[in-house]
Image (tube, grey):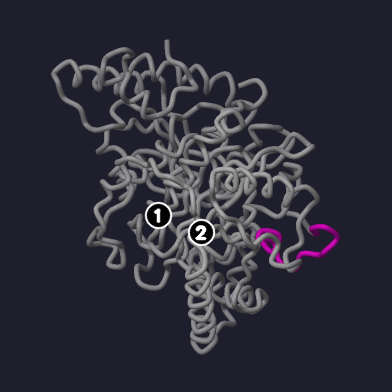
Amino acid sequence: MVNPDTSALNLSRAIHLKQVSCQEVMQATLDRIARLNPQSNAIVSLQEPELLMAQARERDAQLARGESMGWMHGMPQAIKDLANAQGLRTTLGSPLMKDFVASEDGLMVQRTKAAGAIVIGKTNTPEFGLGSHTFNEVFGPTRNAWDPSKSAGGSSGGAAVALAQRLLPVADGSDFMGSLRNPAGWNHVFGLRPSQGRVPMSPAQDVFIAQLATEGPMARHVADLAMLLSVQAGAHPSSPLSLSDDPAVFAGTLDMDPKGQRIGWLGNLQGYLPMEEGVLDVCESALNSLSGMGCTVDEARLGMPPEQIWQAWLVWRQALVGPRIAPFLINPANRAHIKPEALWEHDQSLNLTGAQLMSASASRTRFYMSMLALFEKFDMLAIPVAQVWPFDVSQRWPQSVAGQSMDTYHRWMEVVIYATFAGLPSISVPAGFGENGLPMGLALIGKPQGDLALLKLAHAYEMANQEMINRRPPGV
């Protein structure tokens, strides 16, 4: 009997002790997907059951011979539909890519398979991964695990919902503008945006300038999250700016005494960020838990005007996103098949100059230095993972927040840019639930390359809040 609530690490132990077979795990996974996925639409491009069961039988045969590929031996895994997995479609959520089948694995998938995972399919994502709402014209929308009438967030929305519904033991995702953190918060799981360079991405269009996006792990438990990071992380020659630290450190103990940890609460940046009612309240309840664990929590203020950070962010984002869309527009007829938000990013990028990018880079440098100054006072920073509650699944994006009009399709998620822009690690931890019954996440931001310290504090928080964190979505 496979318990769907079992942690990934405990599942791994059970498989290796032969308390449960890889075939039993695969069958239980396929049964849950058949029951729950038709409504949530979290997993797409699911492979044929016979093929998956054959791979599970081979994993069992390996164990019978005393052979193990790694801690993920026999674990079902679905890959976010922005990454290549050999023999599976990589649609990017775009009708222009709906028939593209990858001929080889991306680096992150290579490492996942080498650890023993069986790739069963993909997890759904917005078109080109743009926007924190998972819907596209290829597969349709992914629905929130806690309320199917609401958005799952994004762009790792399919991954977050698959975790919340116990369709996967762990999941991969990627994060440019909160894409690992926002859906984690909206589906009551953990999502880590690693430090810049921690998880190398290959293949990549550019390996020197395009460092704002990163792949990373998601899980229901921090120890599982850290273990998946130990698989994904590690330097690679194809990624010259990747970090050379030994990723095995993330497979070690996460135990720590949180007493004395100094947490800087950014909140809504002294009223700059509009937030829906109840968001701050739920996040502050999570902060109270940290205080009860012996942490000190004090107000923190960014060292430069947030609007300057946003304007520099816009330049960087358009400079990096525009060239991703450009190849699809070599044929002008393709404009009709690309969502307007992606076209806006591309068209805005056409007007950028090198001088503008360098000016934005100088602003980004000033912002990074201001974050370093904050970390002289604090060990971690904290901020809500979203400014709004999960919204109606039929809505493209919030046009206004708390009565304030949003001037871009992503302005409503401005709260997530600070860790990204500074290249800092950030983890979304479940903060609790609003009066509407929907989950919200609290983002903890660590010091430069401080992924392990961040994971240890998140683990201590999880241990202190197990009853809340172990809540399951309705019908799961």
Residue 74, compared with residue 430, is above or below; it is: above
Q: SS for tag 2? A: strand
Residue 89, image quadrant: top left
- Left or right: residue 195 compared with residue 202: right
x and y percent of residue 5 in the render? 49, 22
What amino acid is at disc 1?
Asp
From the image, which quarter does the N terminus lie in?
A: top left
**Residue 417 showing in the rendered view:** yes
Q: Residue at x 24, y 53 (%)?
A: 246
Give whichever of 57, 340 is nearer the camera. Answer: 57
- Left or right: residue 191 compared with residue 208: right
Residue 319, compared with residue 142, is above or below; it is: below
Disc marking residue 46: none
Is disc 2 surrounded by few (<14), some (14 to 19) or many (20+) residues within 10 Å? many
Q: Residue at x 61, y 26 (%)?
A: 472
- From mark 2 to mark 1, how far is it between C-alphas? 11 Å
Magenta stretch, residue numbers: 400-413
The residue indicated by pointer 2 is 380
Give whichever of 160, 453 is nearer the camera. Answer: 453
Q: Residue at x 37, y 68 (%)?
A: 206
What amino acid is at disc 2?
Met
The residue indicated by pointer 1 is 451
- Left or right: residue 42 compared with residue 394: left
**Residue 136 showing in the rendered view:** no
First in sequence: mark 2 vs mark 1:
2
